[in-house]
Amino acid sequence: MQPRYYQVEAHDALYNYLTSGQTGNPLIGMPTGTGKSLVIAMAVYTAMTYYQNKRVMMLTHVSKLVEQNAKALRNIWTNAPLGINSAELKQRDFYNPIIYGNIQSCVKKAEMFGHRDLLFIDEAHLIGPDQASQYAQAISVLKAINPGLVVVGFSATLFRMKQGELTDDGLFTDVCYDLTGYQAFNKLVAEGYLAPLIGKPTATRFDISNVKILGGEYNAKQLEDAVDKTNITFEACKEIIDYASERQHWMIFAAGVNHSEHIAEMLNGFGIPAAAVHSKLTSAENNSRLAAFESGQLRAIVGNNKLTTGYDFPPIDFIGDMQPCCSPGKHVQKYGRGTRISPDTGKTNCLVLDFAGNVLRCGPINDPIKPRKPGSGAPGEAPIRICDTCGAYNHASARFCCNCAMEFNFAPKIFRSAGNVEVMKVDDAEVLEIFPVSRIVYSLHEKKDAAGNLLSPPSMRVGYFCGLRRFDEWINFESTSNLMRHKARDWWRQRHDADPPATTFRALQLQSELRQPTKITVRLNCKYPEVKSYDYQ
């Protein structure tokens, strides 16, 4: 299995962090569909083969992810000493050097796993600061055995309601690699690694003005009562059939268990083979229905919370959202089910019909309104905004009330907006073009004042000649910025086996030994063209 360039970057960034003397617990942010499983597998392989006698674990919350992650490891390391601990998968291994498991299965007997050096957690956004949580309990036991245990988190959403960023007063301390930002996300779409989401306005709307918000989310029973109306469901299903008639694999999010059954029943009545999956069905029943969906026997699968995270079926080319939510994280995770590419089925994008108003409430998938750390507002600025119409609590950055959709009035220079009502923000998407490289020139770059004094440490200017065009980048080995030095180290390690030089002068001395890319990918729609990636084949 050949890793993509950004998967290699994520792996290298993690081990640069772990070997640089840092003592925290790092995070890696990767959008849904970009292959976190392979990065975890690469990281496990490196830990076990380059560092003797290491013992590692990978925990997540659903057995489907345990299976997916285990499969990724076996794809790159057939004979990995891997054990599975998952009651649902009917495997209960405690002793192998590598353990992949469900947190629900592993927490009760965490001491039996013994000494562990690294703990990888997939879907790390599920870990809150609550010390009574299952993850906190398991980590506490493992740290009691080995105080030097390092926890590495992976997630498509590096934030959490009522906490803010995952690095705000929680388990995780640093973000060592992040592709979840707006520009990085759009770059992955432009490069063909993610499928774009496209949205259409819907005529059907839900009245949830009387639904209370508890603990930062809508009251589940009140929400389902407000949304699960036969006439509304009928109109929404008619719109789905009109818009998605050419789409082959539909995923629909419902506001509750009963609502999911009613949607499936109505779709079947329209002649669309559909089934619901939810918590009131057995695992065998849910798995059977999902298998029917994936084989094409069912055109639509309807879920409440079963499909929000951990479900991987790339051909999904339509999402119907009838589940209003307040959580930007949940919102991003839901729509992430449609961002996986599926060349074999001819999928070019995923259509989204947002009946729930979640894009208006939470922002586009690639530019969501991130919750702030409680109490982190500037002096004199409330961290919440109270709606004058319905009294609901909102983020201070919200443009519209999450409960009644009233638009707030405030100075745009103070608060950021929710983006727009587009499912995926694309107005500033990167324009990328690949150029063959004919020649590369390395030179010293110094910035001086009028008296000839250096204003900043010297850097190496790299000029790529591509036909009649030249593109430049600056590599800063001596920068005072950790980020710039980190970039320089990664740049060097792609081109040379020796450790990165400490000075620009030494780098220039070794320029003849550098491996040279044959092609470069350049972003063109910016003030100065930016070299984004390299091809050495």
Image: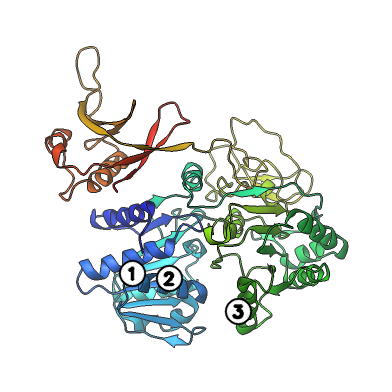
Q: Position of residue 328 (x, y in %)?
A: 60, 53
Q: Position of residue 399 (x, y in %)?
A: 67, 40
Measured Cα–Cα span from mark 1 to mark 2: 11 Å
Name the mark on residue 287.
Answer: 3
| Quadrant placement of the N terminus | bottom left
Residue 162 in view (yes/no): no
Residue at x 25%, y 33% (from the top left corner): 439
Q: Amino acid at mark 1?
A: Ile
Question: Is disc 3 placed on a helix, strand or loop?
Answer: helix
The residue at which mark 1 appears reads as 76
Mark 1 or mark 2, which is nearer to you? 1
In this rendering, position of residue 80 left or right of residue 294:
left
Q: Position of residue 511 (x, y in %)?
A: 16, 37
Q: Quadrant of residue 8?
A: bottom left
Of labels 1 and 3, earlier in sequence is 1
Q: Is 418 above or below relative to 32?
A: above
Mark 2 residue crowding within 10 angstroms, few (<14) / some (14–19) / many (20+): many
For this orientation, the residue located farthest to the right is: 231
For this orientation, the residue located farthest to the top is: 450
Name the mark on residue 69.
Answer: 2
Residue at x 34%, y 25% (from the top left corner): 468
Residue at x 17%, y 51% (from the top left corner): 497
Mark 3 residue crowding within 10 angstroms, few (<14) / some (14–19) / many (20+): few
